[in-house]
Image: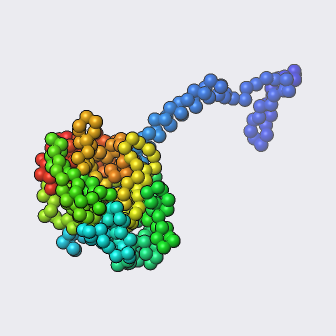
Amino acid sequence: MSSDVSRVSSVGGSEVLECGKDRRFRTGAGFTLVELLVVIAIIGVLVGLLLPAVQAAREAARRMSCSNNLRQVGLAAQNYHSAYKRFPAGYVSFPTSTGVAPASVAMDPVTWDAGPGWGWGAGLLPFLEATALNDQLRMEEPIWAMSNEAAIAARVPTYLCPSAVGGDAAFDVRDEVGNALQFNGRGVRLGRSHYVASHGQESCWGECGSAATGIVFTNIYKSETKLVPIDGDAGRVADGPFFRNSKTRFRDVLDGTSNTIFFGEHTSSLSDKTWVGVVPGAFTHPRYDSPENGPDAAATLTLVHAGPSGGELDITGFPIIHPVNFPTYHVGQMVSDHPGGGMVAFGDGSVRFVSDFVDLFLWAEMSSMNESEVIDWEKL
């Protein structure tokens, strides 16, 4: 029998096919290079289709978490009002109408901001299940006192949006030129917040100190303005619920709490915000440049405004209004890392997602609390 002829033998009761050394045979079918490339291409397409869906699902979860955070903040503000018959101040500063204050409060000679400086976020801590942290704060002392050094750098999860990409760690307070601001040879490090309180349409930052008068809008639709005396009282300019030494009550919100924005987002990818309060002499610095942004006074550590402010008009004569994610990207406006818009909390505790393309006048109307505008919700 030829050597290339197969034969069958029995091993352990099983038949085994044996081949001669010269016989050619196939071991089994395999993938060709073309088939392998096709399979890889199909997998790549499927992954490309799946990833956006996964990212969208993750963002939906982050957006829901952010909405829940703002809802907790809004409810905490209402509980604060129930306890104290008013909402917390935007921030607490030594009151002066003359620019004279004790040296212990370190008053800024330009803005008239002074200690103790505690902001709305610190005031709400007991109503956000953060009593332990609140008990560590010595609010009878200024923010920058050594006794507060550890507590003011604390991380408060409720004040952090999971979609914000600029970080959630504490940050060093800086002066106008960007150097670390120091008191008694020590810097000030503040816990971060991705949420800010609304000052209204108008802003009263650096100009609410030594300036005797300011310009405010009386009619944003016709760009009509008037001069008002300030004398250190930001409430003569602000038309929103939170400002320096504010004591806003429900009855002051004449436009209705369901029509008035109280809180909103500001991502730390643009600038640093804090739940702690305002440090006199501090400045908020943008992390990237745009035609309209730049360093701004200490009040913007906790507060933002919607515009228009101070009679400011653009080159077409239109009042300057900047809603969520408006491309001015100013440190004093609301900015979100959610695609397409940002979250805001109204005075009644409700939370809404506001589109990047919201009507500008509607945004201004929702931001003021006592300008008697009639809100058309169809524009939202």
Residue drawn at 48 percent across, 56 percent down: 178
The foreground one among 371 and 40 is 371
Q: Is residue 133 visible?
A: yes
Position of residue 316 measured from the top left corner of the image (x, y, whole percent): 25, 34
Residue drawn at 46 percent across, 60 percent down: 174
The furthest residue to the top: 2
The foreground one among 115 and 89 is 115
Position of residue 365 measured from the top left corner of the image (x, y, whole percent): 19, 48
Q: How many marks?
A: 0
Residue 272 in the image: above or below residue 321: below
Residue drawn at 26 percent across, 64 percent down: 232
Q: Is residue 62 visible?
A: no
Image quarter where the C terminus lies is top left
In the image, taking residue 219 as reference, residue 62 lies left or right, namely right
Image quarter where the N terminus lies is top right
Choose top left, top right, bottom left or bottom right for residue 223.
Answer: top left
Residue 8 in the image: above or below residue 137: above
Residue 26 in the image: above or below residue 87: above
Position of residue 97 measured from the top left corner of the image (x, y, whole percent): 24, 68
Position of residue 126 measured from the top left corner of the image (x, y, whole percent): 32, 73
In the image, taking residue 62 as reference, residue 218 lies left or right, namely left
Residue drawn at 77 percent across, 43 percent down: 12
